[in-house]
Image (cartoon, rainbow, N blue to C red):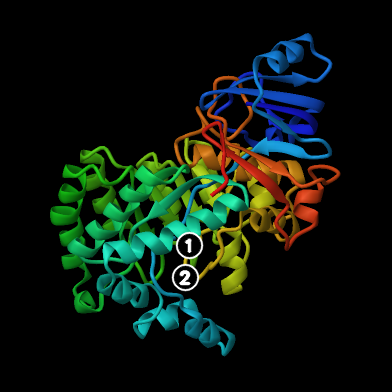
Amino acid sequence: MLIHSIKQLIGIQQENKLLLKGSEMREIDKIDNAFVYIENDRIVDFGAMTDVRYKAYESKTTNRIDASERLVMPSFCDSHTHLVYTASREIEYIDKIKGLSYEEIAKRGGGILNSAKMTEAATEDELYEAAMTRLDEIIRMGTGAVEIKSGYGLSTLAELKMLRVIRRLKENSPLTIKATFLGAHAVPLVYRGHQSEYVDLIVNEMIPLIAAEELADFIDVFCDKGFFSVSETDRILEAGAKYGLRPKIHANELDYSGGIQVGVKYNALSVDHLEFTAEAEIEALKASNTMPTILPGAAFFLNLRHAPARQMIEAGLPIAMASDFNPGSSPSGNMQLILSMACILFRLLPEEAFNACTLNSAYAMGISETLGSITKGKIANLMISHPIPNLEYMPYYYGTNKIDKVILNGKLYNK
């Protein structure tokens, strides 16, 4: 495939960096009037249309896409979602409008427990079909890779069911998909008052069975006020490590929970949410290889305080942004909207926001060696915009889909 006459090719890297930190996040290399040449599923070459190499590729292929007046960019990588579910939770949305908090809804059996009840009743086919529809939706808005968590099971059988659905999605979707086991997403009502027994179930039964079927790439815990403590998180992550499951932690969404520090202790690939982040948490992250990941959709939908993104970048940290696509606290997988929120709500420059939604979010999924930038040898997951003037227009003109075509694994997506 030859994509030619590109108005601007954005997000190129001559040398493959795995992530961008601090002031590096402002850096985006671009080529005006450019081409990209793809063989099989890989980016082979790119450059200016005036380059002599272009003529050789032009004579080599009839599979061409004219990208005149359009931008070509690496696809978004969405490193935090819960998109395997059957039913929406708009009634709780009304409760939020009336003033009930996330914790109050959860305490009365709503929230995650509500989704768990519906997941238990659903078949694998129902979960799969609903999730495939959502995957098609996010692909059309530019997402090329996505992490999907379990956590709406909260029993051994239901968690296994969710993870088997995610495995099936991996096998049948053109997206790059990573699976995360999140049995420690909430405490089932039957274990209220003796939460340690549910932790026992996760450690002694769920993790070994999931590992035996190789159903998960990562393990996660909701380490926060009203959910799982640092000591419980420590125990679950230690058990996961014995089976080679690297952590990705829900941390500090509702309070200073210690979740960031325990994530760093276990070399978590990412710690996510981070609304309550101060100097101690920033210092812990500076000494780590853990990606701080902010979820603007959840903060917006729940009307939470905002994670200190600017302070974190100015301290030299990397930042990733993800959608947190789920039925209760962020019912949208639109990464174009996340890009806009990163700029509007968190005061990131368009370049910083773009890197947070592509390369750094690829790192937060453990895939930045092969995705997240336009680099020779990387997988050809690209998005081609409608005719628009520049990168800045992407977050500025929020609310519409600015993506015209999507290339996944070197092929035009045309479902």
Coordinates of residue 386 in the picture (x, y in percent) = 76, 47
**Residue at the extreme bottom of the image, as rendered:** 98
Is 108 located above or below residue 192 in the figure?
below
Q: Residue at x 64, y 27 (%)?
A: 63
Q: Does the image show residue 290?
A: yes
Coordinates of residue 178 in the picture (x, y in percent) = 40, 44
* Marking on residue 256: 1
Badge 1 amino acid: Tyr
> In the rendered image, which quarter is residue 242 located in?
top left
- Quadrant of the frame with the N terminus: top right
Q: Secondary structure at mark 1?
A: loop
- Disc 1 and disc 2: Cα gap in Å? 25 Å
Q: Which residue is nearer to you in this view: 303 or 176? A: 176
Coordinates of residue 126 in the picture (x, y in percent) = 33, 66
Q: Which residue is nearer to you in this view: 402 or 181? A: 402
Is 338 located above or below residue 173 in the figure?
below
Of the two numbered discs 1 and 2 in the rendering, the one whose residue sits closer to the viewer = 2
* Marking on residue 92: none
Q: Which residue is nearer to you in this view: 369 or 252? A: 369
Give the labeled residue for mark 2: 327
Specify whether 400 is left or right of 272. Answer: right
Q: Residue at x 68, y 52 (%)?
A: 339
Q: Residue at x 35, y 68 (%)?
A: 227
Q: Does the image show residue 322?
A: no
Is 267 located above or below residue 237 in the figure?
above
Q: How many marks?
A: 2
Q: Residue at x 37, y 50 (%)?
A: 169
The mark that comes first in sequence, 1 or 2, is 1
Q: Secondary structure at mark 2?
A: loop
